[in-house]
Amino acid sequence: MSRLVAVGEQPAARLCAELEAGNILFCDREAINLYFPRTAFPISAEEREFLLGQKQTSAAYHKNIAYRPGEDRVTGLDKSEAAEAERLRKILRDYSQSAAEFLEKLLPPYAGKWKLDFASYRPLEEKGRPARTRARNDLPHVDSFPTRPTNGDRILRLFTNINPSKNRVWITSETFEAIAPRFAEALGIPGAPSGHPAAKWLRALAHRSSRLLPGLAPFIRRSPYDVFMHRCHNAMKEDAAFQAECPKQRWEFPPDATWIVFTDCLSHAVLEGQYALEQTFLVSREALVAPERSPLAVLERLAGYSLTIPAV
């Protein structure tokens, strides 16, 4: 099972190894101020007060208010005045930038070897939140982004609880390495019986992808790895037996706490909490200190062949 590792004076490579093993890095406000006194992370009291007043639009559709760094724009915001919308964009942009600066100092082996993905603000109470099964946050799962395939790169996420009085409650279960054989066989991709149609299709796709000219690679958006991870994400949530039987650990992250986790590795869910910020990083698999523990390596050992597509 996973451990909570309090950030202190540990070597950066050790912190990376803890993350890649499926553990959670934890930083409270005191630790951030002590070890990273020059960082602006996470946000000011005035920014927090403003965020607590924001509302999310179409909660059944948008899971959160998202900031897209590459486009410098916000989506999922309730109708508001232009001045308020601009201030929210600036706050989320500053949070995204300060989160990146913070992790550059905390985890230098990854610095410059990641893609800064979306940041998000989560203003809704998670407990009792209505959602389709596949969109529920309270069911243990590993992350996969169907519209943002990673081709084997890792999903590293940094969360901050900005609720002034309530803990954010998570549960975690096993790592991907432990659960992969169960779902690989159930879905028929990689490691399934050779006659299964899905297994045949993925083997064929992997073979064709490996033979493509690099210039054609961008036209195949999702590698065999991405296809499996997305199916696994859905299957975990829809498997009632797994949800009932999987071992669970409960974590309560207090106000002002920040925690960091590879969410493609550690199965996780959020049970309670309102008002949180999050920044996602897509870490290059070449930057990993223990690449053999990555979900890609786990799946390729099961499959016996490459599940990625050629780089451009």
Image (spheres, rainbow, N blue to C red):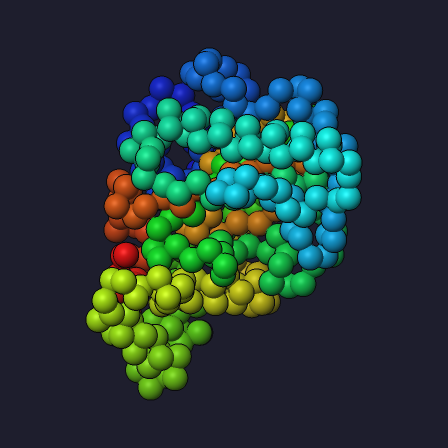
Please name the residue shown 73% across and 32% down the image: 84
Q: In x, y percent, where is residue 172?
A: 52, 47
State the count of labels.
0
Q: In x, y percent, where is residue 116?
A: 44, 40
Q: In x, y percent, where is residue 10?
A: 33, 24
Using residue 269 as the reference point, say whether residue 60 is left or right of it.
Answer: right
155 or 216: nearer the viewer: 216
64 or 275: nearer the viewer: 64
Residue 167 visible at all: no
- Above or below residue 259? Residue 9 is above
- Above or below residue 25? Residue 241 is below
Please name the residue shown 53% across and 16% down the image: 30
11 or 174: nearer the viewer: 11
228 or 235: nearer the viewer: 228
Corner quadrant of residue 124: top right
**Quarter that holds the C terminus:** bottom left
Please name the residue shown 49% across and 61% down the image: 146
- Above or below residue 228? Residue 194 is below
